[in-house]
């Protein structure tokens, strides 16, 4: 029996980076000083989110395949088990995070319409992956941080544009990536988030200006390195 696992390693990198961003920002609030016991809830939340993300693979297969039974069973297993693990978090945070159901619905509609690799679908998917940051933060602190969500989403969305620049190599996507990086700086400044967190995006701008030949694997490794740098910078400059 072959267990279906999402093999989009870039998605996993964004997800676990978002988890780490939530952990770091949560720890910086020193939740233990308030007497909040959040260790087990946070662990269950991360595991539940991991299973929900992995449900995407059998869901996509079920939408495409003629024989759907096995894919539906795997999807049901991952989705139901994931939600079961999230129960402690949902009891406290369901109302706060219910707004994100719109993202889930729109992503499902885009997948079912065969637009899995459309840039809108990819941005929607990244916006779902980065929910992990405020979810983990909420599990640790009991508070929602839209500032954290916007910061993490804006940073990792740049990776979607970077890949598009690499594939299409058109002036439109090169300018679009530069515009996104500039918008990220503006958003960070307006939200009083240290723009030093965006230092890795200098590479995005350099790529847009001086486009060079590069294998997609190399691009993936560069994006992973930038994610690590972003998380490290969060430990020093997030407030």
Image: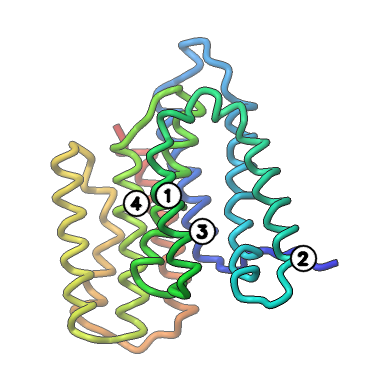
Q: Sequence order check: which comes first, mark 3 or mark 1? A: 3
* Residue on which disc 3 sits: 13
Q: Earlier in the sequence, mark 3 or mark 4?
A: 3
35 horizontally vs 158: left or right: right
> Is 213 rendered above or below residue 39?
below
At x 85%, y 66%, the residue is 1
Quadrant, the C terminus: top left
Label 3 to label 1: alpha-carbon separation: 11 Å
Q: Residue 10 location in percent, x, y? A: 50, 65
Q: Are discs 4 and 1 less than 8 Å apart at CB?
A: yes
Label 1's element? Answer: loop
Nearer the observer, 65 or 138:
65
Of the two numbered discs 3 and 4 in the rendering, the one whose residue sits closer to the viewer: 4
Q: Which mark is residue 130?
A: 1
Badges 3 and 4: C-beta atoms under 8 Å apart? Answer: no
Q: Earlier in the sequence, mark 2 or mark 3?
A: 3
């Amino acid at each position: 029996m072959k267990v279906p696992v999402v093999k989009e390693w870039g998605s996993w990198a964004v997800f676990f980076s978002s988890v780490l961003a939530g952990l770091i920002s949560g720890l910086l609030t020193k939740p233990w000083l308030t007497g909040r016991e959040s260790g087990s809830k946070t662990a269950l939340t991360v595991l539940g989110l991991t299973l929900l993300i992995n449900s995407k693979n059998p869901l996509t297969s079920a939408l495409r395949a003629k024989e759907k039974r096995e894919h539906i069973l795997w999807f049901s297993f991952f989705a139901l088990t994931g939600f079961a693990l999230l129960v402690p978090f949902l009891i406290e945070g369901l109302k706060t995070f219910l707004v994100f159901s719109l993202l889930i619905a729109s992503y499902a509609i885009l997948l079912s319409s065969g637009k899995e690799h459309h840039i809108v679908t990819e941005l929607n998917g990244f916006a779902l992956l980065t929910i992990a940051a405020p979810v983990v933060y909420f599990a640790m602190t009991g508070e929602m941080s839209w500032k954290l969500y916007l910061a993490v989403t804006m940073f990792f969305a740049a990776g979607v544009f970077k890949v598009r620049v690499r594939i299409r190599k058109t002036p439109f996507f090169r300018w679009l990536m530069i515009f996104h990086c500039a918008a990220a700086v503006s958003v960070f400044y307006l939200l009083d988030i240290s723009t030093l967190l965006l230092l890795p995006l200098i590479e995005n701008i350099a790529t847009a200006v001086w486009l060079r030949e590069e294998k997609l694997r190399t691009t993936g490794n560069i994006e992973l390195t930038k994610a690590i740098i972003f998380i490290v910078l969060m430990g020093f400059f997030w407030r």
